[in-house]
Amino acid sequence: MPDHIESPSVSIIIVNFNGIKFIESCLESVLNTDYPNFEVVFVDNASSDGSLELVREKFASKNKVKIVANKYGLGPAKGRNIGINESRGKYIAFLDNDTEVDKNWLKALVNVLKADDTIGAAQSKILLSDKKTIDTCGHYLSVTGFPYEIGTNEYDSGQYNSLIDIFGARSAAMFIRRDILDNIGYFDPDYFMHGEETDLSWRVWLNNYRVVYVPDSVVYHKKGGSLNTKSRYLIFYEGSKNCTKTLIKNLGLKRLLLILPMHILGWIVVSASLILKRRFNESIAIIRGLFWDLCNIKRILNDRKVIQHKRLSSDSKIMPIIMGNYNI
């Protein structure tokens, strides 16, 4: 029996915005993946640096590559959603445009999810481009509702070489079953960037599936593939807006009333510290993000109603995992 029949289909979605420095090596690396049954859906978000033209010139003739050109810069979350709609795979993999992959990265992810139907999503071991320093092995949630990474900037000496449950998978190298996406919904389109994968991972847990870290799947991350001069402002604006919305949507009522005030206070403290450092634009960005949540609270509560109605796992069951075995 041919390998591609035995191996479930995978759609690899790569969203690009002005990533001309990285995208050629990214796609070449992905196309050298040692797995027989995958497609690449390249979604360009109205790049102006020639990266779309480069991809069309060098990769349009490849049978495995499908190019989707958006007319507007929709952001990573909406871009990935468009990629999902254009894809056909049983599994969906997300990569950033500034990544390169080990040839066995995809096989390791597929094998883990095939072997255990309680697993809904996974993340690769993400190393920095020096191939020695860890970028992230996943993330958990602090008691104040802020995500924190595992292993960041540590030298990779094998200390994270065990498959473990994690709260959230980073979209730089995230893997998920399509049937679960169809059930829980795609990335929240209100999240232009930052935190959208945390929200999606949380919904995987709420629907009684696990998110795991797969150390045998290795991806190298150069970082900064779509950053521009507005990115620092956007990180603070989208960070405060999206992190707060994620808590409101996904927490049970009891823990929401406990954690949300601490979370908002945390953002106010960060905003004040930025003022002391004379970083006024970034301080204002945080307040604007929180104000967005306030102005759109009705929409957020409607999203919460849908999520809470569909949830299959209680907070008491999953919070120890979400918070790295520290329960609240």
Image: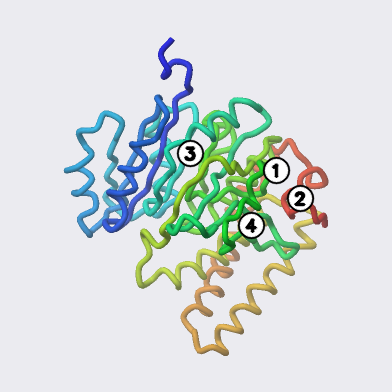
- Precedes in sequence: disc 2 or disc 1: 2
Left or right of residue 146, residue 229 in this image: left
Left or right of residue 58, residue 278 in this image: right
Question: Which of pointers 3 and 2 indicates the residue nearer the eye?
Answer: 3
Q: Compute the Cα span from label 1 to label 3.
A: 34 Å
Residue at position x 63%, y 40% in the image: 204
- Precedes in sequence: disc 4 or disc 2: 4
Dot 3: element: helix
Q: Compute the Cα span from label 4 to label 3.
A: 19 Å
Does 144 appear above or below 200? below
Q: Compute the Cα span from label 4 to label 1.
A: 28 Å
What amino acid is at disc 1?
Gln
Where is mark 3, residue-wise?
Answer: 105
- Precedes in sequence: disc 4 or disc 3: 3
Residue at position x 23%, y 39% in the image: 59
Q: Measuring from the top left, give residue 182's x and y in whole percent.
A: 54, 32
Where is mark 2, residue-wise?
Answer: 252
Question: Which of pointers 4 and 2 indicates the residue nearer the eye?
Answer: 4
Identify the image quadrant of the N terminus. top left
Dot 4: element: loop
- Precedes in sequence: disc 1 or disc 3: 3
Residue at position x 60%, y 31% in the image: 112
Asked whether the beta carbons under mark 4 and mark 2 sit within 8 Å of each other, the answer is no
As rendered, which of 231 and 132 lies closer to the eye? 132
Where is mark 4, residue-wise?
Answer: 150
Q: Measuring from the top left, give residue 66's x and y in whole percent.
A: 29, 35
Identify the image quadrant of the C terminus. bottom right
Badge 2: residue crowd in 10 Å (few <14, some 14–19, many ≥20): some
What amino acid is at disc 3?
Trp
Q: Measuring from the top left, give residue 278's x and y in whole percent.
A: 50, 89
Question: Which of pointers 1 and 3 indicates the residue nearer the eye?
Answer: 3
